Image: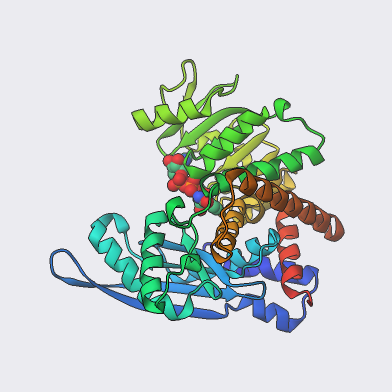
Amino acid sequence: MSNPWKRTKLKLKIAANKIPLDSFSESKILNPDRIIEVSIPIKLDNGKVKVFKGYRVQHDNTKGPYKGGLRYHQHVDMTEVKALATLMTIKNAVVDIPFGGAKGGICVDPKKLSVTELEELTREFTRKLAPIIGPKLDVPAPDVNTNPNIMRWIVEEYSKVVGKKELAVVTGKPIDFGGSEGRTEATGLGGYYVLQEIVKKLYKKPENLTVAIQGFGNVGLYLAVFLVKAGYKVVAISEEHGGIYIPEGIKDIDDLFKCKEKNGKLKGCIEGAKNIGPAEVLELPVDIIVPAALGNAITTENVNKIKAKIVLEMANGPTTSKADEILTKKEVLVIPDILANAGGVAVSYFEWYQNVHKEKMTKKEVFKKLEVKMKSAVDAVYETADTYDVDLRQASYVLALKRLTEKA
Ligand code: NAD
């Protein structure tokens, strides 16, 4: 099923039937609260005017302000934004943070704009969104092709509209501009905490487990750093140009990253390592594979070549529905994205909390709080999986729906 909105609704319906949810609650969860489309006209550097389309979908605010990223990409459309907004509601409920779910974006290829044009686009988008965002209302964050600097522009523009500085209107800001310590590492570290807890439940030891990671960006890098530190044998890493495989394990992830940054590729960074293709990493004879790059990385094309017994989904939506069914039949343990990569939004909540309460946490405090959040989410998902006799993905959906519909 290629329509992400239909796919998400189907998963929600299956989970709703398990509980079962009453028809009012089910209808509420299947229909976003508010769908906004705005026009964003800007003057380009060449003097011409171009009008872009911007979106914000506020799915549900039962648990707190709407929360979710803003994506700048030429493929952004309403069906995708609706699905992603819904998944944010579910993810936030799984890690039990007091936020609802939202997502937004602009249909634009930001690489085709100058910095001045990008800034004007962001400021005009902010002016259009200003009536429906705010620290207690809806709190955007970075997503694909948006970054801390873009968040700074949003804060500045929103603050002008409301007449006071409002750092808490977005998260993912630069550290010297209200951002949180530990946000950079948060998603990778959160995934590491989740895996540690599950490995413990399986009575396995990190030093006996081999791992292959697809993606060496923000998520893949920090996950690899924490895994190696804990004793896991990370034997392969790939990025879009290809990867390396070294059965003895990679000793120093920082060094590898520096080499990749210097040479622009992983190839040649470790003597004796075998060069592999970007997707081959998922087919290696290892215990754990980690898709940490793009969506739809595991499909019916490659699922039968997977040898690992554990999949840690760090990317959003890395497994298609059909491939997911096949993995379940093969008794592969899939740790779903809505649990595995929720560390990022958990630390976004800590950032918002610090802004609202005018506090500053140290990195150590942020890491400790993240560990507690992720480990208790794993325990709750396992308990739900036992109670309803379902896999971890379905259990995460069921847990989220129960939390969203429980009476106060
Ligand atoms: P990033 O842009 O920093 O890194 C992406 C990495 O994937 C790069 O190393 C790139 O070379 C690699 N890549 C791209 N195409 C590839 C291919 N075909 N094969 C192998 N590698 C490929 O992105 P990121 O922030 O690390 O995010 C990675 C994934 O995690 C995305 O799916 C994102 O939606 C998801 N995610 C990220 C966060 C976060 O906080 N950054 C939070 C939740 C989910």
Query: Quick check: 368 left or right of 262?
Result: right
Q: Residue furthest bottom?
A: 24
Q: Position of residue 167 (x, y in %)?
A: 47, 65
Q: Position of residue 385 (x, y in %)?
A: 80, 56
- Figure check: 392 above or below 4: above
What count of labels does the image hold? 0
Q: Nearer the viewer, residue 91 or 285?
A: 91
Q: Residue furthest left?
A: 46
For residue 153, which quarter of the picture? bottom left
For residue 387, which quarter of the picture? bottom right
Residue appearing at x 43%, y 61% in the figure: 71
Q: How is the image coloured?
A: rainbow
Q: Is residue 3 visible?
A: no
- Figure check: 319 above or below 25: above
Query: Quick check: 117 left or right of 317?
Result: left
Q: Position of residue 12 (x, y in %)?
A: 67, 68
- Figure check: 186 above or below 279: below
Quarter containing the N terminus: bottom right
Residue appearing at x 53%, y 47% in the figure: 297
Q: Residue furthest top?
A: 272
For residue 349, which quarter of the picture? bottom right
Q: Is residue 284 visible?
A: yes
Q: Nearer the viewer, residue 23 or 342?
A: 342
Q: Nearer the viewer, residue 359 or 306?
A: 359
- Figure check: 243 above or below 57: above
Q: Position of residue 232 (x, y in %)?
A: 66, 29
Residue appearing at x 68%, y 53% in the figure: 325
Quarter containing the C terminus: bottom right
Q: Nearer the viewer, residue 187 or 157?
A: 157
